[in-house]
């Protein structure tokens, strides 16, 4: 189901009609249109992955802004190739694709996390570099990928910003720590369409701000929600230390026995020490 850039829809409250309804997609597109002219909003009944679908389109030459959500993902994935599972109606999986040309891409996942967390609830914190946390448990994750916009070498990059958020209690089979879900914070069940309408405009605004000013515009806001700051952590190479926030580019600072270690998202996975 798709709403075209020229379609008209009712107000934002119609997102409650359900993620797969034309009214919900039209309401979301209407909220995004002033920020991102020409944007298309699509909701698929089933996809392997919203990120994978938009990356395929980008490599085939698509450079238009698209917000793509799926009611069910069969091969959702996160950072470092990890799988991400969500039940229909019990989770929200979506990706936003658009041309983006920041002077420095460093810290983009942190800026996206700030936008999502601030739009959702004051209690949600951020685990560097790409997770939303609630009370020490993972609530959602972010995956960012890029391709040459329009498939043309030297053109601005086409960024695909994907997010998966647990809305209802997810299965915890095989997990050392049970995940969190948004419904823990709300008096009524979280509806996918309503949450997407709540998140999409702040996300677009954050990306535009990042394009202009980089991570500097988000550093203090990330620090205010930093779930690792002051905690003992262990890096994937076995190095232990204490997390000490981020630098100007969004790299994680870890005080180790010998020095302050600067960690970039491509190098390590970070978990709190036991």
Image (cartoon, grey):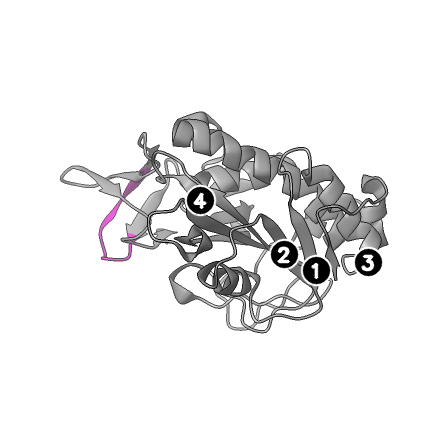
Q: Which residue is mark 4?
A: 109
* Residue 18 visible in the current orientation: yes
Compute the Cα span from label 2 to label 4: 18 Å
Where is residue 101 shown, x and y percent of the image?
Answer: 41, 38
Instruction: Find residue 21 and name its label.
Output: 3
Left or right of 86, for residue 1: right
Disc 2 to disc 3: CB gap under 8 Å = no
Q: Which mark is residue 43?
A: 1
Say what secondary structure mark 3 lies in. loop
* Distance Cα–Cα, label 2 vs label 3: 14 Å
Residue interval drawn in magenta? 235-243
Q: CA distance from mark 3 to mark 1?
A: 8 Å
Disc nearer the start of the sequence (1/2): 1
Residue 5: x percent and y percent?
Answer: 70, 47
Mark 4–mark 3 Cα distance, whole angstroms, equals: 30 Å
Whether residue 260 sits left or right of residue 62 in the image: it is left
Residues at marks 1 and 2 touching, judged by CB atoms closer than 8 Å: yes
Q: Is residue 252 above or below residue 80?
A: above
In this rendering, the answer to whether 46 lies above or below 235 is below
Residue labelled with disc 2: 68
Q: How many marks?
A: 4
Question: Could you say whether the residue bearing mark 1 is in a helix, strand or loop?
Answer: strand
Quarter of the image that includes the C terminus: bottom left
């Amino acid at each position: 189901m798709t709403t075209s850039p020229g379609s008209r829809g009712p107000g934002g409250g119609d997102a409650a009609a359900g993620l797969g309804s034309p009214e919900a997609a039209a309401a979301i597109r209407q909220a995004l249109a002033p920020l991102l002219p020409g944007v298309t909003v699509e909701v698929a009944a089933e996809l392997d992955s919203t990120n994978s679908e938009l990356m395929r389109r980008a490599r085939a030459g698509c450079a238009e802004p698209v917000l793509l959500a799926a009611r069910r993902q069969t091969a959702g994935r996160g950072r470092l190739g990890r799988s991400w599972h969500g039940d229909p109606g019990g989770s929200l999986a979506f990706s936003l694709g658009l041309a983006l040309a920041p002077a420095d891409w460093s810290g983009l996942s942190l800026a996206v996390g700030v936008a999502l967390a601030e739009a959702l609830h004051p209690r949600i914190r951020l685990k560097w570099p790409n997770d939303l946390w609630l009370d020490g448990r993972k609530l959602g994750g972010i995956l960012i990928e890029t391709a040459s916009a329009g498939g043309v070498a030297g053109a601005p990059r086409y960024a695909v910003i994907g997010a998966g958020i647990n809305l209802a209690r997810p299965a915890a089979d095989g997990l050392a720590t049970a995940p969190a879900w948004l419904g823990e914070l709300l008096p009524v069940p979280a509806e996918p369409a309503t949450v997407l309408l709540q998140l999409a405009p702040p996300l677009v605004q954050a990306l535009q701000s990042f394009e202009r000013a980089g991570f500097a515009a988000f550093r203090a806001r990330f620090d205010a929600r930093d779930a690792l700051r002051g905690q003992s952590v262990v890096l994937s190479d076995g190095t232990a230390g204490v997390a000490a926030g981020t630098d100007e580019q969004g790299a994680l600072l870890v005080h180790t026995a010998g020095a302050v270690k600067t960690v970039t998202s491509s190098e390590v996975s970070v978990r709190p020490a036991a």
